[in-house]
Image (cartoon, rainbow, N blue to C red):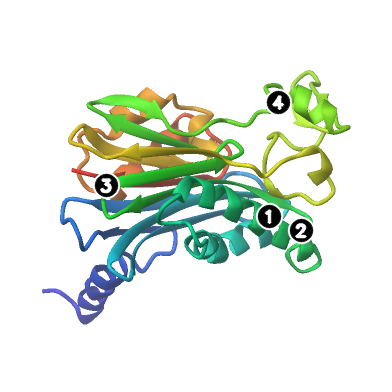
Amino acid sequence: MTSGREILHKMKEKVLGSSDPDSGKGKSKMSKHITHGFHLVKGRSDHAMEDYVVAEFKQVDDNELGLFAIFDGHSGHGVPDYLRSHLFDNIIKEPDFWTEPADSVKRAYSATDSTILEKSGELGRGGSTAVTAILINCKRLIVANIGDSRAVLCENGVAKQLSVDHEPTIESDDIKNRGGFVSNFPGDVPRVDGQLAVSRAFGDKSLKIHLTSEPYVTVETIDDGGEFIILASDGLWKVMSNQEAVDAIKDIKDARSAAKHLTEEALNRRSSDDISCVVVRFQ
């Protein structure tokens, strides 16, 4: 016999996607075939969880927006928490968002970073990487990123990376031109000024003169070949290739189960970082 508590839990899950803040799911009202799910797992480090996720569909006038993001913070949770609450609102408020979404995303990333730097006393001097995806009316997908969180599209079974990993060694000339340097000590990853393992990020006031918050932006049209997209922090990509991730969930129809499976696989492969994952299925 089903208990009252179980019934209440199922009702909450139906309305909210999940009563668990680290796992959830939802679906488009415009297309019953488009669903999303997310799952987060804290890493083995002694600091608090610094990954934040956005996964929701939002009605804006006569349009539906799917809003999805991974914010992977470092040196505190103030910046990624702020991004979770404000970045998408800033993007949508851009005057040319509906006609020039890519340029609007770039402007909103820059303006948001400026606000974060101004609020460093309140938010802390830490920072965050970001990968964001906006699905406009179930057809047009705008993906942007700074840092090493990644977006991967599965198209006809083949993985297609839609983001760029902003690594210090790749952008070392730009960092040096701004007066910084890239360290490369044995047993460690390359770091900007010996500190940060990515060359682009929100926040990081003490390093900002040597960093940039300009995102890589790409626009995709989701057609019949587009199956799903994975957004995940580097805790997943450190131990799985793009195609391995796609292959691991291609037969899992429930988006939340797919996201959870990827985090569990990353743990099985001994990833020690925080792992956050969003899966959006188009079919």
Residue extending farthest to the top is: 186
Q: Check if mark 2's residue and mark 3's residue have beta carbons within 8 Å.
A: no
Q: Nearer the viewer, mark 2 or mark 3?
A: 3
Whole-number angstrom distance, CA of label 2 to CA of label 3: 35 Å
**Residue 30 can be seen in this image:** yes
State the residue position of label 3: 139
Check the image and report above or below for 4 versus 230. Answer: below
Q: Secondary structure at mark 2?
A: helix
| Label 1 Cα crowd, 10 Å radius (few <14 / some 14-19 / many 20+) | many
Three-letter code for the amino acid on which mark 2 is drawn: Leu
Question: Where does label 2 land, which residue?
Answer: 117
Task: Give the amino acid at mark 4.
Answer: Glu
Could you tell me which quadrant the N terminus lies in? bottom left
For marks 4 and 1, give the CA distance.
20 Å
According to the picture, the residue beneath numbered tag 1 turns out to be: 113
- Residue 45, given in percent of the width and then of the height, sits at 65, 45
